[in-house]
Structures are given as structure tokens and as C-alpha cells.
Amino acid sequence: MSFHSPPPLDFIPVQVCDWAELVQKQPEFIHRPIRKGRRLLGIRYELAGHVWLQRQFGDKYTPGQWIRFKADGQDKFRWCQPDGLLLDSEHKTVTIIEFKYQHTDGAWWQLFKLYKPVIKKLLGPDYQIKCVEVCKWFDVAVRPTQRVILCKTLDTVQAGDFGVHIWKP
């Protein structure tokens, strides 16, 4: 039996990315509210994760890169910001990283139905794209659309798999 989790209510998936570009600055319309409680835990976890990955991978790791794109034949611009991109230009692979304090099926939607098609357009067909959710707490009861592959390190994820790496700082 196959199970498919529905997308988050405010999520707009990308079927085909028509055009994409890296943007150096946050869009002007983005305003960050003050976070409290569990949201603040998630932000702190992500920030610690950026430090961890920058120490481990140096310049190959880019946190929070803004991307402007057009998709699905629409003429309007859209924006996205993957939590992290780990680029290995020598092997033509990029690992898209989504930090979640607690494992969630929303990570799959973000990785595979937003970031992956946009990054594929950005880098071209020669690049393999790997998708990893990095989380502190993993819950086997959360059943995303694709089977989870638990990975001990980020380099063990295969292109096409939904990798989950449990990281506890």
C-alpha cells in the first residue's frame, strides 16, 4: 500500500522550473517576525547546523541562499531559500539541506517539489541532486510521500533518495 502525505496548506509545488537565478539579498517584502517557543528552537537548531556544516565543508557549503525563479509557465517571479546547499563541483553533485528540529513530512515537499526542480534548472542537467533533511528528533510515525533513508553522514545519500540525517549538537 502506498501512502502520500498532502502538501502543507500554504505550499505551492513546482512541476517545471522555467528560469532561475541566485540573488544575493533577501527580497524586500520578507519580514522576519520575532519567534518564540518551538519556532525559536528550530531557528537556533538551524543556525547551529550552519556553523557545523561550514566548519565541516568550508566554502562548499552555502547557508540560506535566496533564489528567484519562474515556474510552470507562469510569468510571475517566485522566491525560495533552501536552508543549505552543499556543492561538489568536482563530482557535479549538490546536496540540498533542509533543517527541521523535528522530522516532518513537510521537509519532503520542500526538498522534492520546490528546491529540487529550481536547483536543477539553476545548475543544469549534468548535476546530480541529493536531498537531505537534517533533524534533531526523528519520529517513525511521520510518513512522508517517499520512503526515508536514514544516513549516518551527508555523503552517503544517493541522488533521488529522501535522506534523513539525525544530528544532535
Image (cartoon, grey):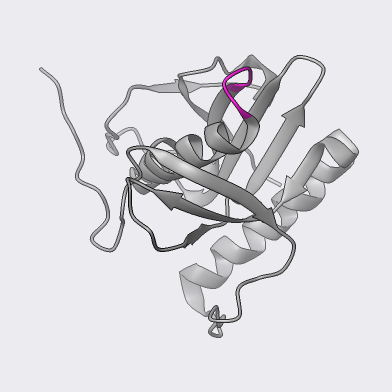
Looking at the rendered structure, the number of numbered marks drawn on it comes to 0
* Rendered position, 85 above or below 128: below
Among the 4 quarters of the image, the one containing residue 28: bottom right
Among the 4 quarters of the image, the one containing residue 26: bottom right
Residue positioned 33% across, 43% down in the render: 105
Q: Position of residue 86 (x, y in %)?
A: 72, 35
Report the side of 111 relative to 87 (left or right). Answer: left
Q: Position of residue 84 (x, y in %)?
A: 66, 46
Residue positioned 50% across, 22% down in the render: 150
Residue positioned 74% across, 51% down in the render: 50
| Pick the front one: 139 or 35 | 35
* Rendered position, 37 above or below 86: below
| Pick the front one: 164 or 131 | 131
Q: Is residue 98 visible in the rendered structure shown here?
A: yes
Report the side of 72 relative to 50 (left or right). Answer: left
| Pick the front one: 142 or 74 | 74
Residue positioned 88% across, 40% down in the render: 59
User: Residue placed farthest to the left in the image?
Assistant: 1
Q: Position of residue 4 (x, y in %)?
A: 18, 33
Report the side of 95 relative to 142 (left or right). Answer: right
| Pick the front one: 48 or 10 | 10
Q: Is residue 65 visible in the rendered structure shown here?
A: no
Among the 4 quarters of the image, the one containing residue 109: top left
Magenta run includes residue 167:
no
Magenta region, main secondary structure: loop
* Rendered position, 148 above or below 5: above
Residue numbers of the magenta segment:
124-128
Q: Position of residue 1 (x, y in %)?
A: 10, 17
